[in-house]
Image: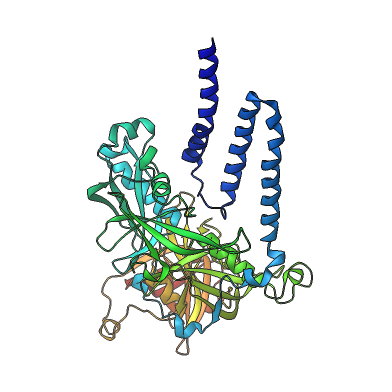
Amino acid sequence: MKEQVNFFKIARVLSIPLLAFILWYVFLPAINLHFFEFWIYLIVNLVYTIIILITFNKKYYKFFIIPVILFALLIILKLSSATMLHSTRYANLIKKENSSFEEDIKEASFEQVPTVDRDTAQRLGSRKMGEMLDLVSQYNVSNAYTQINYDDKPVRVTPLEYNGFLKWIGNKKEGIPNYIIVDMIDGKVELKKLGNNIKYSKSDKLSRDIYRHLRFKYPMDMFFEVNFEIDEEGTPYWVAPVYHNTIGWFGGFDVKEVILTNATNGETKKYNIEDVPKWVDRIYDADEIIQQLNWNGGLQSGFINSLFAQKGVLQTTEGYNYLAIDDDVYLYTGMTSVGADESNVGFVLVNLRTKDTKFYKMSSAEEFSAMESAEGAVQEKGYISTFPILLNIDNKPTYFMSLKDEAGLVKMYALVDAQNYQKVSIGTTVNNVVSTHIGKDITNTESEEDTEPTEFSNAKGKIISIESVVIDGNTHYYFIVDNSDSIFIANIGVSEKLPFIKVDDEVNIEYYEKNNLNQVKKLELLK
């Protein structure tokens, strides 16, 4: 009996380090006093330890004062890091540099305009995966779809992941054999076959789980989300930004270092920010950047001003997107005054590798207003606009959007003048919409202009949208009929009735196709 009692005593004592290990193995807190969750981990283990001690002798209940003191200290340290006490320091976590849009943003190369957003990339990736019958039963496509620059063009990359625990057991020895690359310009999808399979990922278990793998190697470093990227040779990596607090005890988290993990063999290396390889595009988290931009815009004149007077207080608009500029990925978002109207006072571009931030002060339409304007131009079709990409077109800031149907398929494209969102251009191709927007055919050459068309087509239908544009002193009319997705272009010389044509009028037209544009040769207004 005595031996049995001793056994239970030993078991209770051993349960203390056992629980501590299990909690750490499951929740993976950084062993760092600047990590809030580590304090919770400590307090929980202390409470359990005291409970075990009380089973030996009730006098140990007085030790409960220790976790109570720690919890009180935790609250004090958390409050001491609040924005109200360090408003200027929070505001300066990110520093905006005023800059010129025309000088910094090159005129868009229309062959390099991204037309595929995240949602469309996911659909394309899932469709590609569905074609691989040997893979689809064993693996899923991860929803990562990280936007990076690869081979001098914007793409989204995402790994496959195990289709559940049993599939992991059956395939863990070989690992994950593929990742997906989606070209954001033309929508081409490539299921990349790896020479060395991915052995460390978010869908792996136990020590090959990428977070657990990193925590074992770097137990004291604070990292949160890791990004999937590929290097110039197509080798998959996990990019883990390492955070340090810069304000108070728990506040002002910012990236100071980066850990790169080869996804195929688990090799890791830590870099200072300035030493990170150039192929890494996503060091800073977009949501963290948005938070810092809001602190910068709201706290420059103090915490009290941000709540009451709100003089000069700015905030980011609700959405954001990414731009590929000079082989780097930039976060784009508009800046608007607090509680203001549907306009922006400017916009910012933030390099997600260096955090260099530039502010472009100009009055412009708020992004969702531009989206509504684009949708309104084709309201009869019920298309939904993607969040805009900001482009330089004809040295003017211009929103570019894809218009998708209910199935999520891209049907048309829209350009909206950022400074005058009532100026909307619609087209079925990128070249088509740009030509419409700037009032000239960007695909024409001198020799093509002199070529007389030999084949003509006919169309008949009701006008559902019509706009006029003056080009080189001549008025041109752009219109859409109800039984065609094409945009037709007619100059004033085609018919003297063009200025009087309105929506719902029925027309019979003869046209020819030239450089993706439908040029009207004859037009008849029907009764």
Q: Is residue 327 above or below residue 45?
A: below
Residue name at image x 36 percent, y 79 percent: 442
> Relative to residue 238, is residue 73 drawn left or right?
right
Q: Position of residue 240 (x, y in %)?
A: 42, 56
Q: Position of residue 262 (x, y in %)?
A: 31, 53
Residue name at image x 71 percent, y 40 percent: 65
Let me know if residue 193 appears in the view. Answer: yes
Q: How many numbered badges does the structure rendering display?
A: 0
Residue name at image x 27 percent, y 56 percent: 235
Instruction: Please say which color scheme the image uses.
Output: rainbow
Name the outermost residue toward the bottom. Answer: 473
Q: Is residue 16 above or below residue 35?
A: above
> Relative to residue 14, is residue 91 drawn left or right?
right
Residue name at image x 54 percent, y 68 percent: 333
Name the outermost residue toward the front. Answer: 2
Between 20 and 502, the residue placed more toward the observer is: 20
Q: Position of residue 402 (x, y in %)?
A: 46, 62
Name the outermost residue toward the right. Answer: 308
- Which of the 4 image quarters holds residue 55? top right
Between 232 and 484, the residue placed more toward the observer is: 232
- Which of the 4 image quarters holds residue 42? top right
Name the outermost residue toward the left. Answer: 195
Between 322 and 128, the residue placed more toward the observer is: 322
Location of the N terminus (image quadrant): top right
Q: Position of residue 426 (x, y in %)?
A: 47, 68
Q: Is residue 521 above or below residue 169?
A: below
Let me know if residue 205 appears in the view. Answer: no
